[in-house]
Amino acid sequence: MHPKEIQIERYSYDLPDERIARYPLPERDQSKLLVYREGEMNESIYRKLQDYIPEHFLLVCNNTKVVEARLLFYKESGAKIELFCLEPSSNYSDIHRALQQTNEVAWHCLVGGASKWKPGQELMQLFTWNGKQETLVARYLEKKEDGFLIHFSWTASQLTFAEILHVCGEIPLPPYLHRKAEQDDQVRYQTLFAKTEGSVAAPTASLHFTEHILQALQEKNIDIAYVTLHVGAGTFKPVKSETLEGHSMHAEFIQVTISFLEEVLRKWPNIIAVGTTSLRTLESLYWMGVKAIHNPKATLQELEIKQWDVYSLEATITVPEAIQALIDWLNKQALVELICTTQLLMAPPYQSVMAQGLITNFHQPKSTLLLLVAAFVGEVAWKNIYEFALQHNFRFLSYGDGSLLWKK
């Protein structure tokens, strides 16, 4: 069966409200860890993660950093307009470049209170920089299919848009937490190794990692490599159509280096993806390599992975062949880094080729993240895993507990 035909109701389960973790635990690595392998499940904690991973494996983590993407404006009438910055306009080649813009920038946003705001109207927010009062202006340009195009400009023109968001914005906690961001969220909703700004949601599987865990992994000769996938708000978007065909998968920016690809070549197949974002990145890289083999002269846009691409591409090419082809393509382009987008939707019967294990939190019913888990461990296994987690008082969603899942 093609994933387009999947009835999303099959990927639902009863998640009691009290099982959603509203806040993180005081200590990151004290979160519970469900370890699943070949039908067997055990309960542990993240602090003991190294006990469940063999020597010489490679853990792939996402080093994206969450930006303060929620901006509040007030009209003269007092009406509140809330902007959620999703991604830059197509004028910019990638998120990093757009975040480094000074003076002005255009951004795709979700708008709370949009009915109170008309095209062409400007909203202002005052802020203080170096002891001087400055102004951020948001102008409504046009309505788009999945949001609005907004033009931002600011008076402290030496500041980048990333700095503007830091001064004027708030950390965008997931909507299902039903609370405003607090001071602690500035730290706790970032991973220990958050580095490259661009996400509007944290790669939550990595929120449990501490210096102790990193040290314990290193002592066991378990390596860590980093990719960047900037998580979009679409990660929270439930599948509202009856079948998957009616769902539009959000595009997300990938950023990886040739040295990372070379590390993958050395370590494969002994790879564990830390988080669904890392797994989507790894799988996307394989399929980009497949495309590069079929078309060595492909443009970057032709290599990018669209929502249903992988279900029609030849899957007989080995991982080493595909990754080497992608390295060769980058070398021919005189590039040391790959920056592009992916819309990869992993759902049954998709077979993961890049990782043997997946570290991930417990996800919302009827979500593409749950579909990814089902594809990774199998149709029966995901239900057993989630039933076990519910029966054993695991905490769910972004600030909740997590799991180490070995591939079916």
Image: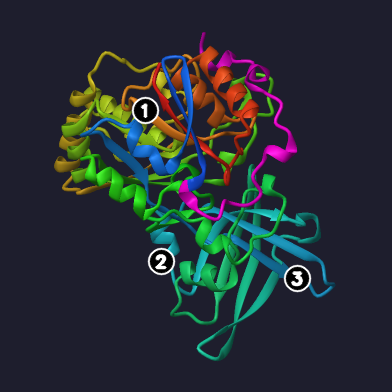
Position of 209 with respect to 152 (left or right) is: left
- Evaluate whether residue 91 shows in this view: no
Secondary structure under badge 2? Answer: loop
Are the residues tagged 1 and 2 within 8 Å (C-beta)?
no
Q: Residue at x 33, y 25 (%)?
A: 356
Quadrant of the image occupied by residue 58:
top left
Whether residue 167 is situated above or below residue 15 in the rendered picture: below
Which stretch is magenta? 1-29
Q: Amino acid at mark 1?
A: Gly
In terms of depth relative to the viewer, which is nearer, 57 or 86?
A: 57
Whether residue 382 is situated above or below residue 226 in the rendered picture: above
In terms of depth relative to the viewer, which is nearer, 136 or 319?
A: 319
Give the crowd class for mark 3: few <14, some 14-19, many >=20 residues within 10 Å.
few
Between disc 2 and disc 3, whose residue precedes?
3
Name the quadrant of the C terminus: top left
In terms of depth relative to the viewer, which is nearer, 210 or 164?
A: 210
Between disc 1 and disc 3, whose residue precedes?
3
Secondary structure under badge 3? Answer: strand
Circle nearer the viewer, 1 or 3: 1
Q: Which residue corresponds to mark 2?
A: 100
Q: Residue at x 40, y 56 (%)?
A: 192
Q: Which residue corresponds to mark 1?
A: 357
In this figure, what is the number of numbered marks?
Answer: 3
Q: Is residue 23 magenta?
A: yes
Per the model, the C-alpha gap separating discs 2 and 3 is: 26 Å
Question: Residue 136 appears at what percent x and percent y?
Answer: 60, 75
